[in-house]
Amino acid sequence: MKQIDLNDWTQTGGGAVGMSYFHKNDPSLMLKFMSADVTMEQIEKELAHSRGVYNLGLPTPKPGELVTDGQRNGIIFERIVGKRSFAKMIGEEPENIDNLARQFAEATKLLHSTPCDKTVFPDVKDCFGNMIRDNQFRSDSIKEKALNMLNDMPDTGTCLHGDLHFGNIIQADGKNYFIDLLDFCYGYYLLDFGAIMSLLKVMKYMEPIFEREYHCTIPQATQFWNTFQKAYFGEDIDIAQNEDMLRPYMAIKTLCMETESGIRIPDVAADEVYSVFG
């Protein structure tokens, strides 16, 4: 693993799993430096998935190599100059939300029309199944019902982001790029809609946290989500009926998000999200 000097880099942002840096002398390089609680296995998995997605021809920053400063570890990526996430654009361009949602839908359709390399990526039933079983906050009954729903879904080779939301696609000069590919896998496409819906149903009870993490408001994100649904599924859909159809996928993803974050969602949100399990 390559040793780096962090003094050669300028911090530009951060999130739950790490910080991002730009190289001071080479504008083509970006460093994703992981938090101390992210394991080396997870970092290596994200690098392998990033290379796999790049090799599929899907737009994503070109991955480089593993690096360390002697204490923390990270990954070098191609820097996408001028990039903004859809989350940030929603907050900065509220007058353009509907257009952004349609662009996001086109990027999602591209993802879901791409056959996945099953020799590189795991089956979503294995990935999500393990996270459901490891959830420490929910009853065995809920987890059993979720696993049964998951296992009854069609087996397909469709590419899934695994954590698809408006923070995980970025844009620069009108081109979209998929990022944060640790959970990339293959399987039933409707599972990819669970993350956005889960964020809205859960984070509406924690709005200040949502605004800090996703750079937009719940009403703005809801408008984006509603337009996105119509752009993906058809302009004539009924939003309420479509969300009822997506509810099991939201609940399954929420179970996984609790496991990954180690944080139990508020009971008021859990009552709404997990009602699908009876």
Image (cartoon, rainbow, N blue to C red):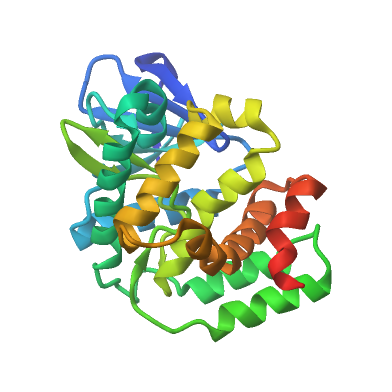
Which residue is located at x 34 percent, y 63 percent? Answer: 233
- Regarding residue 8, the answer to whether it shows in the image is yes
Instruction: Name the one closer to the observer, 130 or 101.
Output: 101
Instruction: Name the one closer to the observer, 204 or 130.
Output: 204
Which residue is located at x 70 percent, y 37 percent? Answer: 205
Using the rendered view, name the quadrant where residue 127 is placed.
Answer: bottom right
Q: Is residue 66 left or right of residue 202?
A: left
**Vertical placement of residue 265 versus 135, above or below:** above
Which residue is located at x 43 percent, y 74 percent? Answer: 188
Q: Is residue 6 left or right of residue 17?
A: left
Using the rendered view, name the quadrant where residue 131 is placed.
Answer: bottom right
- Regarding residue 42, the answer to whether it shows in the image is no
**Vertical placement of residue 121 versus 24, above or below:** below
**Which quarter of the image is occupied by the N terminus?**
top left
Using the rendered view, name the quadrant where residue 23 is placed.
Answer: top left
Which residue is located at x 40 percent, y 41 percent? Answer: 224
Instruction: Name the one closer to the observer, 123 or 149.
Output: 149
**Vertical placement of residue 200 versus 258, above or below:** above
In percent of width and height, residue 138 lies at 80, 62
Q: Is residue 276 left or right of residue 179?
A: right
**Which quarter of the image is occupied by the C terminus?**
bottom right
In percent of width and height, residue 35 lies at 58, 35
In percent of width and height, residue 208 lies at 64, 25
In percent of width and height, residue 78 lies at 24, 36
The tally of labels here is 0
